[in-house]
Image: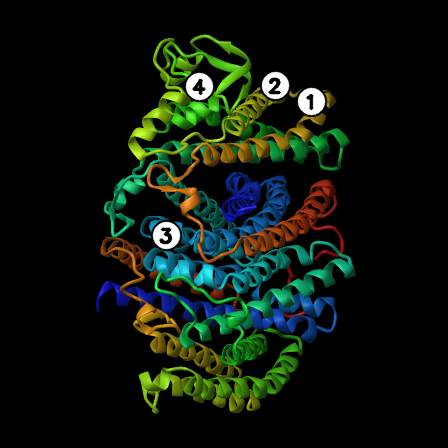
Amino acid sequence: MDLNTLWFALIAVLFVGFFFLEGFDYGVGILHPFLGKNDTERRMIINTIGPVWDGNEVWMITAGGAMFAAFPHWYATLFSGFYIALLLMLLALISRAVSFEFRSKIDDPRWRKLWDWTIFFGSAVPALLWGVAMANLVRGVPINAGMNYVGGFFNLLNPYALIAGLASLTVFTLHGANFLTLKLGGGMEERARETARKLWYPAAFFLLLFVIGTYWMTDVHQRLGLNPGVIPMMAVIALLASRWAIANRRDGWSFILTAVAIVFSTVTIFIALFPRVMVSSLDPAWSLTIYNASSSPYTLKVMSIVAGLLIPVVLVYQAWSYWIFRQRITPESHLEY
Amino acid sequence: MDVVLLARLQFAIVTVYHFFFVPLTLGLSVLVAILETMYVRTGDETYKKMTKFWGKLFLINFAMGVATGIVQEFQFGMNWSEYSRFMGDIFGAPLAIEALLTFYLESVFLGIWIFGWDKLSKKAHATVIWVVAIGSNLSALWILIANSFMQQPVGYVLRNGRAEMDNFFALVGNGHVWVQWPHVLTSAVATAGFFVAGISAFHLLRKSQNMELFRRSFRISILYGTIGTVLVILIGHTQAQYMTRIQPMKMAAAEALWETEDPAAMSLFTIGNERERRDVFAIRIPGLLSFLSYNSFSGEVRGINDLQDEYVERYGPGDYIPPVAISYWTFRIMAGAGFVMLALAFYGLWLASKNRTAESPRYLKLMLWAIALPFVANSTGWIFTEIARQPWIVFGLQKTADAVSPNVSAGMVLFSLIAYTLLYALLMVANVVLLRKYAEAGVPEATNADLAPAGAR
């Protein structure tokens, strides 16, 4: 495996980590104004991700940084091209990032309601737009010979990408409900599980629609064949199976299964892309690939050493932080946020 | 307005705004870590209360820094795609390392710190905030390695129309990094010192409950702020000497020095005519600029006109003169704020050593307002260092005008500029409301360790 492939894989890993972790964070953010019936309940919900959400979001920041370092043309084309979509996402993420810290610091219903809604939109908008963005990577967008995106904002809102956006939105929300079932106490876990049970239907519907759309509206079936292989199938099967786990109160399994669905769907997208990183819908020769979009071999080498040294350490201490805060949040818990 | 100007304006707004919060995070993380360490060592509950009180303000500020930092990671791709393509090899690497090495560290450990008071031993908990402090200050190193390349490109080759890295260690060992990083770190110490001293002064003035806590906070922070201010000035001096050698045009613009002089005079106050490149009115001290540049009253300091001629010869026809008036005044505001801080810090240190702080209401009142000074200095310092590098985005390699995204229209940049500005203005209101509330609330005598106003828990 050459370094270009390694870095493609590493960026895939960063997105996998990001969607797995921020997936439930977004879900929790989307669910909290509805699932929490009063202020204490809403605070309990927010506190389930309180200690970890920021560390989870770093996966996205790092993915962006890694794209910049390893594939500068990918970084440049994607972010200048998906400009308005990215702007909306950034505005949402900025508001969301301060909300957790600000919300419970003033005891005023209007103040708290304001931040409840910034948490909601700050979670829902990126949950939707990441699906849209990923689908457009695979489907292809107008990129010219100079590697520049020449479409507009509405080129990104094609039916296939919107289906993908709704799929990521609903699957993340389901993933969040499964997370809350594991993390809440005092009876609220029952309500979270019931919500998960209902959320399964739209999530399964949109994921299946996305699979059909992928066959119908992209070149993936030519690349992967009619039988796409184990990984995409696992993603779908895992999501379908989570219905059973939720119904049977196997809460650990429910969470693991939605996690598997997210992880394997993300991997599928990267497999479908490889070795391209952005597909040009104008001319296949103008697509960005792991070779024409990459940094110099020297930079890739330096970054490989750095990543090889640091990523294992990050995984260890991030896992440790989850271990520290493994207990369920009950009404009696000390609520920091 | 054209797209380059709008993109620059946007970069200036989001970056200066982000940098309101960064130095306070850097400096205050260390100060809070010191306070918690004192609590662990002495077992004195007052130190714990201090840790929690200043820690709350630290967290509010940190949240703003994190939120506004998100744009920083993506805006190069959005507005400056040509720059990203040209420089990604070099600029992306430290950015990615910053994320991998330090963003994970600070955010994961900060989460543990906020929520871990009753989950970790005292010692472990104090260690956690030290990790946050080290992580934050190291993140400054990596972003400044990236910025230093823009000021003084090293460790690269030009190949395939791009700047490609050929020596990572040259990038890290860039002399510019090692004057710039210390300058930023010490300015952060000064910022946090003045922030804590100013709010302590407010409580001492108001004779709030828990006077002892604020007396102690004032003593510690004024010492911390004095150390920071003295060092930031000394290092700033070294940095200016370095700049004279590496970026003479920047120095000449900072001094509005049109002609090469030996010995060179320093301007105290100049009203100039930028178009005709001459002074309209100037008060200048002979020899001082040579002294500042070389520690000797003689020595040639090169002027704008000479450098312009030299750059035309080296880089081809063009205007290589940065906006002189902005450079001149931002440099003076920065340095001026620094010297006012120095005087205030020394006076405060003297008062504190005589235990007479509480007897000087006028000084205490002044210190509350002086919180603004480091923020003014930090912002003007950055505006200066980026403006006075123009017309280059990477000195000698790429011009700012060539760096913008070709496929992003002026309308899009304007739209996002307005969106960011509106959102940032609203967030600033919320931030100030919260900081004021928590800073004013002080620490009620009765409650132990629980500092949030009623209902906020």
Q: Earlier in the sequence, mark 1 or mark 2?
A: 2
Label 3 and label 2: CA atoms lie apart by 45 Å
Query: What percent of the width, then of the height, locates residue A13?
Result: 37, 69
Circles 1 and 3 on the same subunit: yes
Label 2 residue SS: helix
Q: Earlier in the sequence, mark 3 or mark 2?
A: 3
Q: Which mark is residue B92?
A: 3
Label 3 and label 4: CA atoms lie apart by 37 Å
Residue at 67% across, 20% down: B356
Which residue bears the numbered disc 4? B258
Query: What percent of the width, then of the height, locates residue A164?
Result: 50, 79
Label 1 and label 3: CA atoms lie apart by 47 Å
Query: What percent of the width, then of the height, locates residue A147?
Result: 37, 62
Q: Earlier in the sequence, mark 1 or mark 3?
A: 3
Task: Residue type at mark 2: give it.
Answer: Tyr
Image quadrant holding the C terminus of chain A, namely: bottom right
- Nearest the camera: B368 or B200? B368
- Nearest the camera: B449 or B66? B66
Residue B32 sits above or below residue A173 on the image: above
Label 2 and label 4: CA atoms lie apart by 38 Å
Residue A297 sits above or below residue A121 on the image: above
Residue at 41% across, 16% down: B259
Q: Earlier in the sequence, mark 3 or mark 4?
A: 3
Could you tell me if the residues under marks 1 and 2 are in contact, i.e. CB atoms within 8 Å?
yes
Could you tell me if the residues under marks 1 and 3 are in contact, i.e. CB atoms within 8 Å?
no
